[in-house]
Image: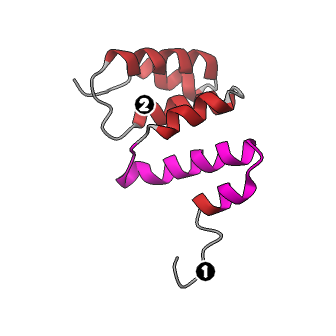
């Protein structure tokens, strides 16, 4: 059973009802066996960030395995969590800003 969030969840998110969207995404995440590209988990983490729930967002991102098209959104969210935790250096590291140009 692969994840396909209901259109209502997306509209909650798009209307910036982050609490409603977080509740709905949490239900979707708990009701499915697979979220292969971590789409739901990443959206839930983003909602948690918007709600100021930094540690919960961080926990969600720690278990995310997003690669491919979801890799950049995962890294951006992880960098936001690091920055909001006061770890600007960690945020820059995640985004590759501290690497020598020969490595980037």
* Image quadrant in which you'd find residue 59: top right
Image coordinates of residue 9 in percent, x first then y, are 47, 20
Q: Position of residue 46 (x, y in %)?
A: 58, 34
Disc 2 crowd, CA 10 A, few/some/many (<14, 14-19, 20+): many
Going from N to C along the chain, the mark reached first, 2 or 1, is 2
Q: Which residue is mark 1?
A: 100
Q: Secondary structure at mark 2?
A: helix
Q: Main secondary structure of the magenta part?
A: helix
Identity of the residue drawn at 67% across and 47% down: 82
Q: Position of residue 15 (x, y in %)?
A: 61, 25
Q: Nearer the viewer, residue 10 or 89?
A: 89
At which x and y percent is residue 70? 41, 48
Whether 87 is drawn above or below 81: the answer is below
| Magenta extent | 65-92
- Give the structural element (helix, strand or loop) at label 1: loop
Tell me if residue 73 is in the magenta stretch.
yes
* Residue furthest right in the image: 86
Q: Residue at x 51, y 32 (%)?
A: 60
The residue wearing badge 2 is 40
Using residue 55 as the reference point, say whether residue 38 is left or right of it: left
């Amino acid at each position: 059973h692969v994840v396909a969030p209901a259109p209502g969840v997306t509209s909650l998110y798009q209307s910036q009802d982050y609490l409603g969207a977080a509740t709905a995404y949490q239900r979707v995440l708990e009701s499915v066996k697979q979220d292969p590209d971590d789409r739901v988990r990443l959206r839930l983490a983003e909602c948690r960030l918007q709600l100021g729930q930094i540690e919960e967002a961080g926990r969600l991102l720690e278990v995310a395995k997003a690669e491919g098209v979801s890799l950049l959104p995962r890294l951006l969210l992880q960098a936001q969590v690091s920055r909001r935790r006061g770890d600007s250096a960690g945020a820059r590291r995640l985004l590759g800003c501290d690497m020598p140009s020969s490595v980037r």
